[in-house]
Amino acid sequence: MTRIYVPRDSSALALGADALAQAIEAEAARRGLEVELVRNGSRGLLWLEPLVEVQTPEGRIGYANIEAGDVAALFDAGFAEGGAHARRVGVVDDIPYLKKQQRLTFARIGITDPLSIDDYVAHGGLEGLRKALQTDGDAACEALIESGLRGRGGAAFPAGIKWRTVRGAKAAQKYIVCNADEGDSGTFSDRLVMESDPYVLIEGMIIAGIVTGATVGHIYVRSEYPHSIATLEAAIAKARAAGWLGDSVLSTTHRFELFVAKGAGAYVCGEETALLESLEGKRGIVRAKPPVPALVGLYGQPTVINNVITLATVPIIFARGAAFYKDFGMGRSRGTLPFQLAGNVKQGGLVELAFGVTLRELLYDYGGGTASGRPARAVQVGGPLGTYLPESQWDIPMDYEAYAAVGAVVGHGGLVVHDDTSNLAELAQYAMHFCALESCGKCTPCRIGSTRGVEVIGRIRNGDTSIRQVQLLRDLCDTMVSGSLCAMGGMTPFPVLSALDHFPEDFGLANVSHHAPKAA
C-alpha cells in the first residue's frame, strides 16, 4: 500500500490542503489504488506548501505547491510511485534548505503524524521523560543549566535557574505555564511545534513538573491559533489515555495534569506577568517585579513560565544529555534556534540552526533573497519590537551577546525582510502606533510615550526635521527604555532608533549621529 503524506498545519490548510487530501483519496479510489493517507505536520518549507510526499524505496518524494486540480495529472505521471512531474522536488530530506539544517527541537516536524503516539515514540519520544523520572530533581536542574538552554521566547534567561528557583520554593501547589501567545510579526515556530509535534511540548511540560514538583500545567495559546488549540487538546486527551498524565505519570508516583487556555488577542499577554493575570481570568495587565513568577506566580504560587520552544527543547536535552546540546552554538548562546524567514523573502520558512549563523547566510543561502527580486535593504530581527538591521550588520553572528553589543535582539528568531522600496520612517512610526494600540496602559512611559512617539515621528516626516524634534524623539525613546514596566514599552524604541540611526534619509534627515539603543 502506498503511503501519501498531506500536511495539516495552518499554512497548508490555508492553501487548500483539506480539499487536496480529499481529491487524492477520491482519485486513488477511482483508479482502484490502495493508499494510506497520513496528515502530517509541515516540514517548515513554507514556500513549497502544500508539499505532498509519497513514501518510496528511495525515501519520501515531494511534490510542491499542489492543488486539488493537479491530482489527476499527478496520478497519470506515476505520482504514487514517485514518478516524474514538473512539481516533483525529489527526496524531501535531500532538499538543501532542509538538509543543511541542524534539527534538534524540530527533528520530528513534518515527518510524523502529529497525533500518533506510536509515531512519536518510534521517533525517540518519551526518552527524555523516562530519564527525567530516574534523575534526582536537583541534578536535573543542574543538567539544564549545564546545557546552556536559555528562554527561547526572547528574554534568554537560563531555563535551569528558573526551574531550580521553583524547585527550591516551599509551597503546597506549583505550576508549569507554557507561553504560547506567539504574537510577534514573522514568527511561527511555536505554531509549528503545536500543530506538527504537540507531544514534544507535552513531554517537556511533564518533565518540568516532575523536576520542580509542580503538578498542574497550563498552555496559554493565542486565540488566533485555532488549529494549534484543537491539536493540543486532542494530543493531551490521547496522552492522558496513554498514562502520561493524571495521578500516575507512566505508572510512577508522580502526578501531573495539563490544560489548554485560550488567550483573547492581547499582544501584551505575551509578557509573562500579563499572561498570568489573563490566565487567572483578569485583564491582562503587567505586574511589577519583584516578586518574580518563579516565587509568586499563578494564583500567587511558584510558577515556571517558559515559551513553547524552550519546553519543547527539554526532552532532547534529557534524552541526549547536557553536553550533547551544549556542543551546538557559540559563547553563552548554546544549542539551536528556529529562525523564521518571513516578509519579502523568496523562500520563507523555518530554519533550525546553531547560534552563530549570520543574517546574510539566512537571507541568501536559505531564503534565496527577496521575493520581489529587488535588493534587500533591512531585516527586522526579533519581532515588532526588534531592530532594523542594515546590510552593514548582516555578518554579525546570531548570538544573544553579539546582537546586544550593537543594540539589537535575537528575540524569538523571527526575521522580516524588507527590500529597497520600504520606508523605514513609516515603519518606525508604525512601531510606536502598534505600542499605543497594544499597551496595557499600566505605566506612563509606554501608554503616553507611544502616543507622543507617533506624533513626533509624524512631524518629522511632514518636514520638521529640526534638531529639536529629533532630540525630542530620542529623549522620548530613552524615557520609554528606562521607565517602562515591561518590554512592550521598553523595546518599542529599538525599531524606531535603529531606523533613525541607519536610515536617516527616510526621515528627511541628511546627517544624523548614530546612537544605537542600549539592549534592555
Image (cartoon, rainbow, N blue to C red):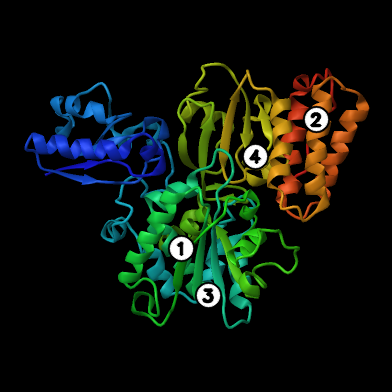
Q: CA distance from mark 1 to mark 2?
A: 44 Å
Judging depth in this view, the residue of 489 and 166 nearest the camera is 489
Tell me which residue sits at (72%, 32%) in the image. 428
Helix, strand or loop at mark 1: helix
Which of discs 4 and 1 lies nearer the camera? The answer is 4
In 3D space, how far apart are the residues under numbered discs 2 and 3 (Cα atoms)? 48 Å
Judge whether 171 appears above or below 193 on screen.
below
Task: Say which label, 4 or 3, has the lower sequence index.
Answer: 3
The residue shown at (68%, 41%) is: 385
**Which residue is painted at 52% across and 40% down in the image?**
339
The residue type indicated by label 1 comes to Gly
SS category of the residue bearing label 3: loop
**Mark 4 or 3: the one toward you:** 4
Reading the image, the residue beneath label 4 is 384
Q: Check if mark 3's residue and mark 1's residue have beta carbons within 8 Å.
A: no
In the displayed structure, 275 sits above or below 336; it is: below
